[in-house]
Image (spheres, rainbow, N blue to C red):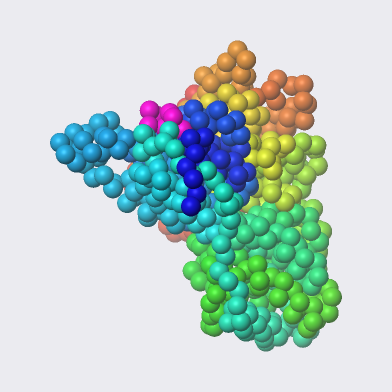
């Protein structure tokens, strides 16, 4: 039996376990119930406390930190703090991010007083299980620690579940337990995977055989197999980038990624054919993925609405290996894990087709087969070169556009800067615009399924502090509406001296993506319709917030740009380490036309009808004459 020593307390036990997992920063908002733990954390010295303006921002930072590092943690106080953290924890649950949520609750004595007398103190609810029950919906393990003798077992069980399931866990600790003695940590906390036995081996073999059969049944016009791999989020979550690279290099098979797995491996790899996102894909990529390849092999890809970009289903010529099983056409093989499938599939493909036997440039093949169409790239190199142009002629030559911004940024990242960057993209038009940036492995983060607007601003904090990416600068793309949700997290960037560059894409202060989803006809005939009133935002001068957050020893800068030449000048300044804009966070307000949108969303916009009335909705034309569809009236 393990002896209880006075040297170890519940607070120290948890601090030691978090440090053992390699966690270097704990994000959160303090409260009186959390105080004893934070005092112990500081005394231990292994983990730095990062206080954030909001619990939601703490969760976003911990989420991004965990995506890069493998596990992250946030700590808050009971109810008022915990419920604010809930949204971030829900996103981590959906997107399989190992996040540890620590919730410090009122003391055991206070709970006893409530049970006996009905006495409620600060942050308490008449339902003592309220916090626990809510977090059970978004975690794989949730524990209330009310007995110091049981604390080590409960903590270890939750952390083991977090590592094993790669999803959030919840630890609720009563305030008066932090300083109580408990057993010291002994054996390390480890991931506990399902055993791989004879039955699992048989299922794996059957799945691989089915995949090879599917490939053989779908040859190209010349009789050769023409599969394409679609690498997804679980390649990142399970840290299988090396196995994916091995498979591609050994077989030569061309591959794309989902948006959520963008830059999971280096996008300069010879067989990388682009990011596939359904109808929202780059037209060249969709042409290759859907029209030229004859079967698609999803490896760790999630069939979410965002990944499928407007498509409703996958077809009978698809493989989808995710969530612990493999679908091959209409057949399903349960209990086949991705880390076993990738090497087994690699061996089978090499045996069937030889080393590098599936090597192909699908762009060149398709171009030659279709008689060299002028609007399609002549080869993979040609496609990649087209993404690195210094800028495409925008629809409004005198003003920046979404496409113009991202085309120019792509050229900057690929040709002009020597700095390493991590692109952090928010939801909506920011995500659609940034998905075709060409980036190195680990150079992109987004929240692809949960899509909580404003996530990117808090996430940039976690990106900058994760040990694996701390040498890089975060480059954030966020819409103006999304930025209004979490703008105060720039305060954390400033206080910590993070040299983030946050591009706020201001399209005339309204929710452009919501307008696109509800009434896309607004974009069909610019100048003859107003956006729906509920999508209109109060106008902000986002760049001026830098002055609010800046201090004498903590610089922050803000600029506003509207023209391509202004963007060019700003990017040039980012390459000069002596320029003051590089001393701390930089807020960039990018002013765009209200009717502009990324070209990838064009499939949603109806074609204008020659006979249809040109008013969009009743009253639209008259309002347009009064200037109702213009941008900031102050110019």
Residue drawn 52% across and 35% down?
A: 7
The residue drawn where x is 37% and y is 34% is 175
Q: Is residue 615 left or right of residue 552?
A: left
Identify the residue at image location x=19%, y=41%: 115
Residue visible at 69% across and 53% down? 263
Quick one: which residue is furthest to the right in this view? 355
Query: Is-magenta flag for residue 32?
Result: yes
Residue 178 on image: x %, y %: 42, 35
What stretch of residues is rendered in magenta? 31-37
Query: 288 and 165: which one is in front?
Result: 165
> Could you tell whether 472 is left or right of 616 in the image?
right
Asked whether residue 552 is in view, the answer is yes
Q: Is residue 324 above or below residue 541?
A: below
- Residue 360 visible here: no
Q: How many marks?
A: 0
Front-most of 463 and 179? Answer: 179
578 vs 523: above or below:
above
Q: Residue 591's quadrant in the figure?
A: top right
Residue that lies at the very extreme toward the left in this rendered image: 117
């Amino acid at each position: 039996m393990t002896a209880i020593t006075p040297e170890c307390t519940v607070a120290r036990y948890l601090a030691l376990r978090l440090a053992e997992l390699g966690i270097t920063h704990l994000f959160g908002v303090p409260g009186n119930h959390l105080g004893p733990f934070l005092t112990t954390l500081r005394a231990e010295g292994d983990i730095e406390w990062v206080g954030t303006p909001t619990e939601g921002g703490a969760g976003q930072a911990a989420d991004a930190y965990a995506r890069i590092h493998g596990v992250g943690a946030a700590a808050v106080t009971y109810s008022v703090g915990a419920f604010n953290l809930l949204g971030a924890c829900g996103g981590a649950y959906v997107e399989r991010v190992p996040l540890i949520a620590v919730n410090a609750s009122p003391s055991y004595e206070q709970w006893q007083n409530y049970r006996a007398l009905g006495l409620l103190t600060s942050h308490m609810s008449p339902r003592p299980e309220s916090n626990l029950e809510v977090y059970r919906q978004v975690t794989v393990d949730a524990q209330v620690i009310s007995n110091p003798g049981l604390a080590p077992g409960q903590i270890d069980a939750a952390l083991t579940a977090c590592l094993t399931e790669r999803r959030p866990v919840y630890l609720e600790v009563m305030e008066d337990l932090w300083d109580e003695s408990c057993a010291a940590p002994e054996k390390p906390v480890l991931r506990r995977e399902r055993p791989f036995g004879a039955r699992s081996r048989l299922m794996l073999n059957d799945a691989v055989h089915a995949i090879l059969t599917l490939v053989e049944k779908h040859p190209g016009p010349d009789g050769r197999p023409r599969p394409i791999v679609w690498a997804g989020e679980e390649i990142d979550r399970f840290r299988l980038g090396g196995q994916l690279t091995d498979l591609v290099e050994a077989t030569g098979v061309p591959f794309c990624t989902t948006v959520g797995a963008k830059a999971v491996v280096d996008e300069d790899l010879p067989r990388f054919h682009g990011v596939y996102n359904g109808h929202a894909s780059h037209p060249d990529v969709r042409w290759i993925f859907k029209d030229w390849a004859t079967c698609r092999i999803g490896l760790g890809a999630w069939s979410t609405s965002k990944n499928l970009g407007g498509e409703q289903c996958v077809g009978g010529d698809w493989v989808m290996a995710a969530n612990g099983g493999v679908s091959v056409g209409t057949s399903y093989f349960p209990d086949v894990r991705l880390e076993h499938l990738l090497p087994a599939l690699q061996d089978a493909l090499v045996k069937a087709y030889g080393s590098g036997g599936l090597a192909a440039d699908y762009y060149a093949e398709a171009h030659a087969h279709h008689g060299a169409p002028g609007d399609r790239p002549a080869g993979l190199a040609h496609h990649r070169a087209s993404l690195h142009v210094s800028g495409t002629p925008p629809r409004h030559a005198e003003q920046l556009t979404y496409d113009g911004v991202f085309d120019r940024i792509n050229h900057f990242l690929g040709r002009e800067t020597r700095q390493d960057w991590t692109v952090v993209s928010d939801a909506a038009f920011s995500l659609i615009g940034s998905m075709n940036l060409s980036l190195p492995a680990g150079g992109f983060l987004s929240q692809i399924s949960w899509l909580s607007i404003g996530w990117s601003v808090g996430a940039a904090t976690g990106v900058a502090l994760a040990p694996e990416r701390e040498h890089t600068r975060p480059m954030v793309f966020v819409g103006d509406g999304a930025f209004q949700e979490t703008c105060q997290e720039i305060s954390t960037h400033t206080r910590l001296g993070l040299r983030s560059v946050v591009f706020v894409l201001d399209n005339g202060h309204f929710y452009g993506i919501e307008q696109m989803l509800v009434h896309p006809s607004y974009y069909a005939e610019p100048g003859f319709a107003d956006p729906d009133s509920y999508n209109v935002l109060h106008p902000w001068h986002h760049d001026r917030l830098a002055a609010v957050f800046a201090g004498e020893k903590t610089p922050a800068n803000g600029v506003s740009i509207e023209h391509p030449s202004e963007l060019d000048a700003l990017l040039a300044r980012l390459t000069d380490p002596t320029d003051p804009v590089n001393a701390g966070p930089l807020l960039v307000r990018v002013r765009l036309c209200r009717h502009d949108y990324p070209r990838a969303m064009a499939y949603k916009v109806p074609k204008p009808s020659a006979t249809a009335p040109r008013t969009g909705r009743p009253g639209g034309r008259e309002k347009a004459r009064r200037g109702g569809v213009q941008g900031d009236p102050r110019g």
